[in-house]
Amino acid sequence: MLKTIPAKTILSGYAEHNSWFGANYNMNLYKGCSHGCIYCDSRSDCYRIKNFDAVRVKENALEILERELKSKRRTGVVASGAMTDPYNPFEKQAQVTRGALSLINRYFFGASTITKSALVTRDIDLFRAISEHSPVLVKITITTPHDSLARLIEPRASLPSQRLEALSGLAQSGIKCCALMTPILPFIEDREEDIRLLVKRVYETGAKMLYGDFGVTLRMNQRDYFYEKLDKLFPGVKEKYIYRYGDSYNCASPHYNRLRKVFAEECERYGLIYRMSEIIRYYRKGYYEENQLTFFKEKP
Ligand code: SF4
């Protein structure tokens, strides 16, 4: 059963030039995530989320969101999916993310979503409606082309093959969508042939954008959980992490430079947009005047 937690706010404050996909607001309707990714950053101590694997919905989330959307002086792109997947298994029945997208549409905001669930295609109608007036970007994270590997590292998320199918559904429906190829786990997923294959698979979906990075970040608590899983799933790999990265936050693949080059080459070959600044420009295009720094107008 889906539990609730008290909440005072849903939307963050306005940010003008967010370098992470150019969103202006952030929202989390749920707390916790049941997808079980072994590398999940949201487990880190700094976020203080107890019992992270249990999904809870924020009480009166949609009422609070509506109040906040109405009260904002400026519209802008509302991002979701940073701390929890907005398309967790409860969302199918609860439809809180769907309700939030309806409000985002009603109050003329844009939407930028990250997910690892094929359920996102259910809301194509709303993404379409929003894109009539504001930018939309749907990002689906895919870190490996192999379903069998994903079952180990992202055990309860949709399989990569299902995520690619979802990406294809979005692209065919005219929704601006992007594959997010991060994190790529060193010593597990950082194989040149897999990067090439994944870029090709993304291209075949019809999506125009792909963002990649080659490594993982690790901090307190998240690292302990990750290492525990490595010991169970990939014996001997934890020792490689300890030897190479110690307590470092940034754990770039030992093949980082090579993989970046291969990734860029493959994206160029298939005509995919892969630089962050170009992705932001592409999905916002048409919604603001050229050279206008503040791309959303003041609300009437
Ligand atoms: S889907 Fe995202 S929030 Fe959920 S466990 Fe995986 S990395 Fe964490």
Image: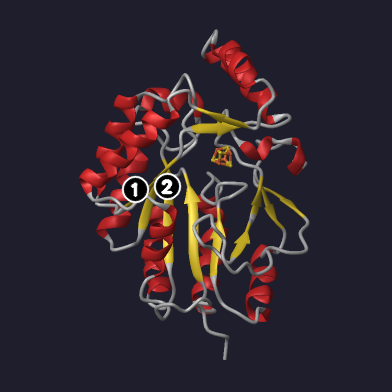
Point out residue 84 in the picture as x, y percentages from the top left corner: 60, 46
Point out residue 249 in the picture as x, y percentages from the top left corner: 65, 32
Residue furthest toward the top? Answer: 236
Q: Amino acid at mark 1?
A: Ala
Find out whether the residues at labels 1 and 2 contact each other: C-beta distance under 8 Å: yes
* Tag 2 residue: 140
Kindly identify the residue that appears in the image at 22 percent across and 46 percent down: 270
Point out residue 277 in the picture as x, y percentages from the top left corner: 43, 58
Label 1 SS: helix
Kindly identify the residue that appears in the image at 69 percent across and 37 percent down: 52
Query: Is 82 placed above or below 134 here?
Result: above
Indicate the quadrant containing the N terminus: top left, top right, bottom left or bottom right.
top right
Apparent side of residue 230 relative to residue 285 in the rendered image (left or right): right
Q: Is the residue marked by circle 1 packed among few (<14), some (14-19), or many (20+) residues within 10 Å?
A: many
* Tag 1 residue: 166
Query: Is 164 placed above or below 215 here?
Result: below
Apparent side of residue 71 relative to residue 272 in the rendered image (left or right): right
- Seen from the viewer's position, the closer of residues 40 and 298 is 298
The Cα–Cα distance between marks 1 and 2, rounded to whole angstroms, is: 8 Å
Kindly identify the residue that appears in the image at 50 percent across and 26 percent down: 153
Within the displayed image, which quadrant is ligand 1 positioned in?
top right
